[in-house]
């Protein structure tokens, strides 16, 4: 029914244009004759008037057909611009040429020679005025009769900004008007873009936001670097305006610049840096046409691994996860985005030795990404034996199976919480790293680990929690005003994991440069502001105290770990710490056995295996992070 109504409206609109054009075609012919004879209708010879009148029907029909060939009835005239004007120009000149040929040479209807250019000129003027007058009336009606609520500032007076301004001006659905534009190009200062004045550069955002009573700011800079976007957002945050942003350069390439592509400013716009660059050829060389197993493939990191691996055309991608819902969702997504992918989804626990060996024997993967793990610090403090059974026991069993069934590469997803851990989860991940190094000494499989910090938007992470608390009206809960964490986007972290896999020779712990550490309290304040609220006034920030096992600062490197560089400036290799592989793996089995027996002294056993594990230091500032000097 809706489609019928839509088609009916379109038919009526096109019929109206046809009738209007018919009037314009004949008006142009009339004006051409009248002007030829000095605006005196009485002076127009009867023979010429009858000639034009006798040809009127044919002229109207042929001209409308030519207009249709030039698609003048398919354009959206509410967005009419230079392209549409050029189309009108060529259509009218073509119609004038056809009129000359048919009247003069075929039908031998004689009129003054000046009639043809004059009628063509008037046709161009009338058709153009008709189309653009519609756009003008549409815009005028919105300004005069629509209650404009939003006063919009556009940052970026380029192609994207121009497109956004044009669409806002032509839309009856957007309750707002663009008031001014900002651009750092000094040559554009004082100029107009789609009738909107460029009033200054980024240094004039605040004064113009106040001067013009701006309520919304749209950042239309799809090709700008993350650093530039972050700097502009830092300025915009000082206003109380709502912020929207155009996502990226691909919108321009695909000609998708539209208000529908605008999104809310996300926290990673403030934290982000320029996109991580990886050598796709290196990644392709080791994953293309390989059978790849991803444990924890339904989780935040695991699912993104699967997405990016699918792009590199593996021979077979096997997703293993204990949670059926997670596995189902990524399976459906990949079937939709990569229908050609040879995809297998298995429900299994990495703690189930027989199940794991059966899977490895059946599918014989070339590469294993081990992302399955318990990662929540407070939960693992309350259930330490579960952390050992899943993280330590699961990693040992997966590594042993990889060794036994000839896996070429085994890549462990580790955590910065493994460095000088103060909690059970971190200590368990440190043991996982050492398991990898121990197996490297005994196996032909290339065992490596990749260590990084928090990822934005992962399941259970702080960002989704903050957003949910803001939607409820607060308060936003932060454990400590001075708590600091490293952050990276999930796609960024996974891209580096894939690149690190290309560098793997065996035994390495790859460490990702996470950028500058971020204060969680600042993160909370920024999210509140980006949501259009004032921290402390509209939404409170409540400090709840450090949770069990939580540190104020996370670290990426231990004191006795040196660093060596790789070809990627964001990936480093931590120096291996010498261990007795056989003795250590024996202790791992004893620890796993103790956890299964639900012993009460699991923390004491962890201290024995991980000398850097100091639960008594939870909450104490011990900051040995990878500094710029170390990384350089």
Image (tube, grey):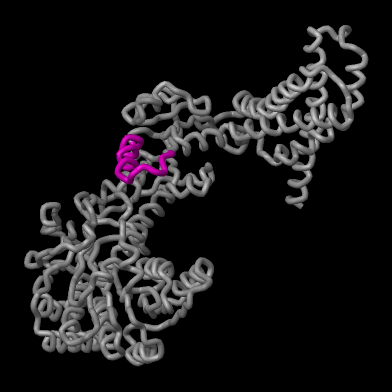
- Main SS of residues in magenta: helix
| Residue 148 image point, x, y percent | 56, 29
Residue closer to the observer: 326 or 616: 326
Residue 393 located within the stretch drawn in magenta: no
Q: Is residue 229 left or right of residue 315?
A: left
Give the number of callouts. Answer: 0
| Residue 512 image point, x, y percent | 23, 62
Residue in the picture at 34% in, 61% down = 490
Residue in the picture at 40% in, 26% down = 188
Residue closer to the observer: 472 or 632: 632
Residue 536 visible in rendering: no
Residue 84 visible in rendering: yes
Residue closer to the observer: 43 or 532: 43
Task: Name above or below for residue 35 compared with residue 457.
Answer: above
Q: Is residue 496 left or right of residue 12?
A: left
Residue in the picture at 59% in, 29% down = 147
Task: Name above or below for residue 494 compared with residue 215.
Answer: below
| Residue 130 image point, x, y percent | 71, 26
Q: Quadrant of residue 616?
A: bottom left
Q: Is residue 583 left or right of residue 54?
A: left
| Residue 407 image point, x, y percent | 30, 84
Quadrant containing the C terminus in the rendered view: bottom left
**Residue range (magenta):** 220-237
Residue in the picture at 11% in, 88% down = 583
Residue 234 located within the stretch drawn in magenta: yes
Q: Quadrant of residue 292?
A: bottom left
Q: Quadrant of residue 45?
A: top right
């Amino acid at each position: 029914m809706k489609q019928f109504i839509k088609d009916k409206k379109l038919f009526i609109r096109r019929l109206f244009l046809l009738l209007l054009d018919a009037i314009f075609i004949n008006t142009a012919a009339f004006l051409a004759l009248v002007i030829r004879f000095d605006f005196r209708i009485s002076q127009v010879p009867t023979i010429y008037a009858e000639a034009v009148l006798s040809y009127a029907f044919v002229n109207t029909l042929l001209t409308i057909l030519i207009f249709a060939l030039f698609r003048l009835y398919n354009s959206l005239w509410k967005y009419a611009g230079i392209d549409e004007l050029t189309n009108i120009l060529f259509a009218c000149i073509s119609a004038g040429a056809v009129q000359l040929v048919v009247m003069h040479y075929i039908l031998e209807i004689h009129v003054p020679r000046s009639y043809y250019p004059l009628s063509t000129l008037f046709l161009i003027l009338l058709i153009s005025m008709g189309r653009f007058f519609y756009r003008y009336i549409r815009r005028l009606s919105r300004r005069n009769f629509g209650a404009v609520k939003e006063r919009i500032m556009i940052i970026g007076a380029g192609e994207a900004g121009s497109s956004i301004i044009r669409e806002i001006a032509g839309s009856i659905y957007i309750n707002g008007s663009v008031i001014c534009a900002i651009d750092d190009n000094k040559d554009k200062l004082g100029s107009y873009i789609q009738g909107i004045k460029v009033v200054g550069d980024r240094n004039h955002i605040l004064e113009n936001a106040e001067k013009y009573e701006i309520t919304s700011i749209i950042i239309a800079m799809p090709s700008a670097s993350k650093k530039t976007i972050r700097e502009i957002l830092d300025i915009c945050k000082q206003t109380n305006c709502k912020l929207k942003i155009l996502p990226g350069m691909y919108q321009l390439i695909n000609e998708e610049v539209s208000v529908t592509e605008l999104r809310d400013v996300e926290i990673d716009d403030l934290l982000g840096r320029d996109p991580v660059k990886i050598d796709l050829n290196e990644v392709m060389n080791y994953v293309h046409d390989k059978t790849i197993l991803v444990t924890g493939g339904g989780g935040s990191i695991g699912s993104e691994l699967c997405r990016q691996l699918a792009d590199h055309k593996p021979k077979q991608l096997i997703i293993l996860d204990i949670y059926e819902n997670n596995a189902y969702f990524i399976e459906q997504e990949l079937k939709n985005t990569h229908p050609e992918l040879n995809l297998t989804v298995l429900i299994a626990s990495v703690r189930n030795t027989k199940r794991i060996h059966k899977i490895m024997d059946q599918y014989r993967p070339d590469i294993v990404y081990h992302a399955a793990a318990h990662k929540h610090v407070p939960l693992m403090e309350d259930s330490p034996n579960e952390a050992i059974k899943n993280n330590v026991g699961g990693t040992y069993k997966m590594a042993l199976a990889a060794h036994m069934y000839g896996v070429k590469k085994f890549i462990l997803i580790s955590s910065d919480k493994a460095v000088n851990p103060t909690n059970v989860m971190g200590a368990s991940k440190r043991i996982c790293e050492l398991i990898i190094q121990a197996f490297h000494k005994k196996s032909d499989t290339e065992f490596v680990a990749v260590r990084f910090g928090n990822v934005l938007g992962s399941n259970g992470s702080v960002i989704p929690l903050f957003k949910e608390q803001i939607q409820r009206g607060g308060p936003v809960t932060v454990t400590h005003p001075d708590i600091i964490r490293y952050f990276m986007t999930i796609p960024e972290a996974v891209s580096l994991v894939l690149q690190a896999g290309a560098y793997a020779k065996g035994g390495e712990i790859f460490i990702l440069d996470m950028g500058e550490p971020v204060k969680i309290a600042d993160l909370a304040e920024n999210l509140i502001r980006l949501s259009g609220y004032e921290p402390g006034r509209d939404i409170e920030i409540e400090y709840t105290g450090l949770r069990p096992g939580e540190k104020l600062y996370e670290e990426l490197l231990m004191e006795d770990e040196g660093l060596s560089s790789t070809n990627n400036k964001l990936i480093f290799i931590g120096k291996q710490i010498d261990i007795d592989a056989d003795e250590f793996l024996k202790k791992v089995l004893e620890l796993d056995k103790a956890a299964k027996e639900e012993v009460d002294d699991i923390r004491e056993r962890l201290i024995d295996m991980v000398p850097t594990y100091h639960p008594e230091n939870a909450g104490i500032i011990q900051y040995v992070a990878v500094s710029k000097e170390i990384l350089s």
